[in-house]
Amino acid sequence: MLINCVAYQEGRKLRDIGVDEIHAHVERPDCFVWVALQDADADELDRMKANFGLHELAVEDARDGHQRPKIEEYDDSLFAVIHTVDLVEDAFIWGEVAVFVGERYVLSVRNRSPRGFLGVRARCEREPHLLRKGSAFVLYALMDAVVDRYFPVVDALETELEALEEQIFVRGSERANIERLYQLKRQVMHVKHAVEPLIEASAHLHGGRVPAVCLDTKEYFRDVFDHLYRINGALDSIRDTITTAIQVNLSMVAIEESEVNKRLAAWAAIFAVAAVFAGIWGMNFRHMPELDWRYGYLVALAVMASVCGLLYYRFRRAGWL
């Protein structure tokens, strides 16, 4: 679905144009066209391929989707795949943006993402002195917007982790904590899979052999690289803390099991002593003076109760009961 198709000249918006007018504006040396698509089908991508002369392999990746984050260079153009993470009502929604960048065009294809980039377009149009740098600045603005959306996600992950840490020492919550910690770890790794490949890819846009289309904007891509590096560091810290929390939670489970085993062993010892006395006096041998004694039964009960009480007292002091 076509969202916008706008021509820009010398950093300022010229006008909205139709798809049939794209080729004419791309041919103008002082003009570039910025097209935004959402959940584009094969026919729309084929039309854009014909208008912009897009590389067949890049179009195939955009059509298939579910690509690893990357930035690839095709002759004098770039193809970028960026994963989006949107936080909607405490739920994460994962999407993808494919961006085609040439000297006189930018084509962004947004898939499975509820949030658009109209704010990015408005920001660029408010800064004509920067938009004059051309299509590479639009790529930077799109990448910067996506990366900035990672920060609230990281904050949400940290908040969730802090809440889980407070529950670790609550008795009876071990199983629920383990399930939530593993779920949180999966979410962290999902975000990390979006961030980590993009660090390496964005590094090529500001250092070493920078693509020709990005020569005037490499300082801006260094800013994106710095943000990604900070986010990746925060994710590593969260992941390490989750690992530690899981180990502590498992230790709490082991301690709780040990406490249960102690209590069971203490009660078993107490009842075993009573069973021993009962077994001895219950053998009914002929020559057992206790059997013929008038107070033998009461004395036997008193002895068993006293020994069991003594054991209970000692186990209680030892912390086993």
Image (spheres, rainbow, N blue to C red):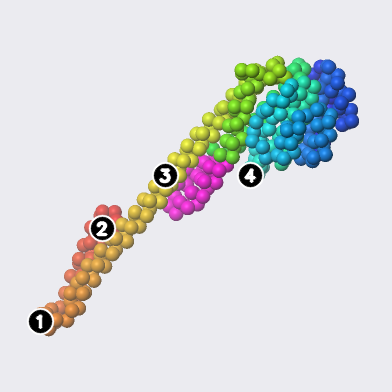
Residue 152 visible in the shown view: no
**Amino acid type at mark 4:** Ala
Mark 2, secondary structure of its residue: helix
Q: Nearer the viewer, mark 2 or mark 1?
A: 1
**Amino acid type at mark 3:** Val
Q: Which residue is painted at 69% across and 30% down in the image?
A: 80
Viewport quadrant of the N terminus: top right
Mark 4, secondary structure of its residue: strand
Viewport quadrant of the C terminus: bottom left
Does 168 lie within the magenta span? yes
Work out whether 199 lies above or below 265. Answer: above
Work out whether 218 lies above or below 38. Answer: above
Q: What range of the chain is rendered magenta? A: 159-188
Q: Residues within 10 Å of mark 2 (few under 14, many from 20)?
A: some
User: Which of disc 3 and disc 2 is earlier in sequence?
Assistant: 3
Q: CA distance from mark 2 to mark 3?
A: 27 Å
Residue of label 4: 91
User: Which of disc 1 and disc 4 is earlier in sequence?
Assistant: 4
Q: Quadrant of residue 9?
A: top right
User: Which of disc 3 and disc 1 is earlier in sequence?
Assistant: 3
Q: CA distance from mark 1 to mark 3?
A: 61 Å
Residue of label 1: 287
Q: Which residue is painted at 73% across and 33% down in the image?
A: 57
Mark 3, secondary structure of its residue: helix
User: Which of disc 3 and disc 4 is earlier in sequence?
Assistant: 4
Does 77 lie within the magenta span? no
Q: Nearer the viewer, mark 2 or mark 3?
A: 3
Residue of label 3: 248
**Amino acid type at mark 1:** His
